[in-house]
Image (tube, rainbow, N blue to C red):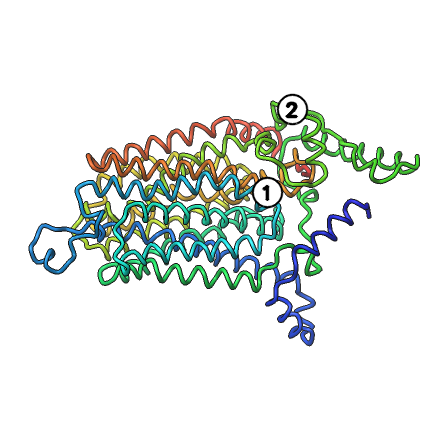
């Protein structure tokens, strides 16, 4: 073993200590031979479930604001409502309520988008157990503080904006953390399907947040925030007790990214084989010549340029930095092929998804005769479709190995379905149910695939030369860029909906078309590679 690898592992074991809950379980499981025989499987299941539960709670705490909007700006058309005190809640009870709601959404989403880039940088350098636990507890605190405004009779717009800003900052701890953990514990085999099932936490969290908020919205809307805040804080403490940060600290071995195989073109397969053989021969030569391991560690073997090689060559200093398995910088991550295209595509796909997330309950109520609670319940069907879309996109991506093509096809069908929902969704509840599920499938499918399987794939790309520490940074870049779109969408929807909801849907359709166009270069590459050789594999 090389000295540098030994030192890295030692530091990792000292820093990422075994959680207290795991220590207790280990002491109880010493008498259970089944646990020792299936130890790695048990830990993988715990990571899958804990990260699933964690990010479901993150999304659960985001949903109450979309449900409570209709109550914060109540219908004051009758004297009875005014006497009952249901005429909204200042400062959102005026004619500019949609503008103020847009400000709240933007305060959360812009702070989330900006902080996401820093969050990915930090996540690669700290223990993810502490990182996620602290983030979830603080998210619960600020979710609770939003509901506390009603019980404390706070009507300051600045208070609500500040709460949303800090909630957005701490929410950024979630995505880089959970994706990095799943990437560490699970290999690339059937990654699209695994991530597709796992990514249903987003929709399940949205559904839970909507149902909890809808249950209290007409009686005491403060509890719509207080209850999710308490739940996410409690789950954060659960992660502190049981989350295993890295496989090595419990005697498991991480999935070797360098030994995973996937379909590619002939030239890539041959070139990678030649590069590996050259590396082995060179390493053997230096070993026989008496050179120290530390000297051979500094030698970088660059592969022959292929169509997947970045157009801009990275400086030598950056290549040496990457080859040692250390965390990479934001600029260096942009050189990974596909990161820029998928990031820009996610900007527009997440714009569409989050516009639905924040405005769908209010749109359903304004375009139908349903009340706030029933409108919120009906809006959950969009997330039900999102679950189906995420699983379908991941499964097809595994079969074909063509992630960009899968996203493009789904975006192609999303645009006409959005138009159909706007035109015919209010005709009947049955039509609305079917179209909402269809919209959720084709809108959330590409969004889920890019933020999970694609991000993990790019974070362990062959151009990184085996460095798996880039995953959090790549995830933060892609999701951070998408989060800017998520902030822009609800803001524009708040302004445009004051004039016409139809124009909001036109904005969403145009966004889907732009997202589809941005992936066309990658689609051409994938189709060309598939035609050249569909049966050859290469090692990454």
Q: Position of residue 169 (x, y in %)?
A: 45, 46
Q: Position of residue 514 (x, y in %)?
A: 39, 29
| Residue at image point 72% right, 33% down | 320
Specify the label residue 313 is tagged with. Answer: 2
| Residue at image point 67% right, 30% down | 318
Vertical position of residue 293 compared to residue 46: above or below = above
In this image, 201 relative to 331: left or right?
A: left
Q: Report which quarter residue 2 is drawn in.
A: top right
For the residue pair 435 and 399, the one nearer the viewer reads as 435
In this image, 266 relative to 65: left or right?
A: right
**Cα–Cα span, label 1 and label 2:** 20 Å
Q: Where is residue 407 in the image (x, y as percent from the top left)?
A: 45, 37
Label 1, on which residue?
471
Q: Which label's residue is closer to the chain start, 1 or 2?
A: 2
Question: Do the residues bearing badges 1 and 2 touch, measured as CB atoms within 8 Å?
Answer: no
Asked whether residue 107 appears in the rendered view, the answer is yes
Q: Report which quarter residue 60 is drawn in.
A: bottom left
For the residue pair 19 and 180, the one nearer the viewer reads as 19
For the residue pair 342 and 298, the one nearer the viewer reads as 298
């Amino acid at each position: 073993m090389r000295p540098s690898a030994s030192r890295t592992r030692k530091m990792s074991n000292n820093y990422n200590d075994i959680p207290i809950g795991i220590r207790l379980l280990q002491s109880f499981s010493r008498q259970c031979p089944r646990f020792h025989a299936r130890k790695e499987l048990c830990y993988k299941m715990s990571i899958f479930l804990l990260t699933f539960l964690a990010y479901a709670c993150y999304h659960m705490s985001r949903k109450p604001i979309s449900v409570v909007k209709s109550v914060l700006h109540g219908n004051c058309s009758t004297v009875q409502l005014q006497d009952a005190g249901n005429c909204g809640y200042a400062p959102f009870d005026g004619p500019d309520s949609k503008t103020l709601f847009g400000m709240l959404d933007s305060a959360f989403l812009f702070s989330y988008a900006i902080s996401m880039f820093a969050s990915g940088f930090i996540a690669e350098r700290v223990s993810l157990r502490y990182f996620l636990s602290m983030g979830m507890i603080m998210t619960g605190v600020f979710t609770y503080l939003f509901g506390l405004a009603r019980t404390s009779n706070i009507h300051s717009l600045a208070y609500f904006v500040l709460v949303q800003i800090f909630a957005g900052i701490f929410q950024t701890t979630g995505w880089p953390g959970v994706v990095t953990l799943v990437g560490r514990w699970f290999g690339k085999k059937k990654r699209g399907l695994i991530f597709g099932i796992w990514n249903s936490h987003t929709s399940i969290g949205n559904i839970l947040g909507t149902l909890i908020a809808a249950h209290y919205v007409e009686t005491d809307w403060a509890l719509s925030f207080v209850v999710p805040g308490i739940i996410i804080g409690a789950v954060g403490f659960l992660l502190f007790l049981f989350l295993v940060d890295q496989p090595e600290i419990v005697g498991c071995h991480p999935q070797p990214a360098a030994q995973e195989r996937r379909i590619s073109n002939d030239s890539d397969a041959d070139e990678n084989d030649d590069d590996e053989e050259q590396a082995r021969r060179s390493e053997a030569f230096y070993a026989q010549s008496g050179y120290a391991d530390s000297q051979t560690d500094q030698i970088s073997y660059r592969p022959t340029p292929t169509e997947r090689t970045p157009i801009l060559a990275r400086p030598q200093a950056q290549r040496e930095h990457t080859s040692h398995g250390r965390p990479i910088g934001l600029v260096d991550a942009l050189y990974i092929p596909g990161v820029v295209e998928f990031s820009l595509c996610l900007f527009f796909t997440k714009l569409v998804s989050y516009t639905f997330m924040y405005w769908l309950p209010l749109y359903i109520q304004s375009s139908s005769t349903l009340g706030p609670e029933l409108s919120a319940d009906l809006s959950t069907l969009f997330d039900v479709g999102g679950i189906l879309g995420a699983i379908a996109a991941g499964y097809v991506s595994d079969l074909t190995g063509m992630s960009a093509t899968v996203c493009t096809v789904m975006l192609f069908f999303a645009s006409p379905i959005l138009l159909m929902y706007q035109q015919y969704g209010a005709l009947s509840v049955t039509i609305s149910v079917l179209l909402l599920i269809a919209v959720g499938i084709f809108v959330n499918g590409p969004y889920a695939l890019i933020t999970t399987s694609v991000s993990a794939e790019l974070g362990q790309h062959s151009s990184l030369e085996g460095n798996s520490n880039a995953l959090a940074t790549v995830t933060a870049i892609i999701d951070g860029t998408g989060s800017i779109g998520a902030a822009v969408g609800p803001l524009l929807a708040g302004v445009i909906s004051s004039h016409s909801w139809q124009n909001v849907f036109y904005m969403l359709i145009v966004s889907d078309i732009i997202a589809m166009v941005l992936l066309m270069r990658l689609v051409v590459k994938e189709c060309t590679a598939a035609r050249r050789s569909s049966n050859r594999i290469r090692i990454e």
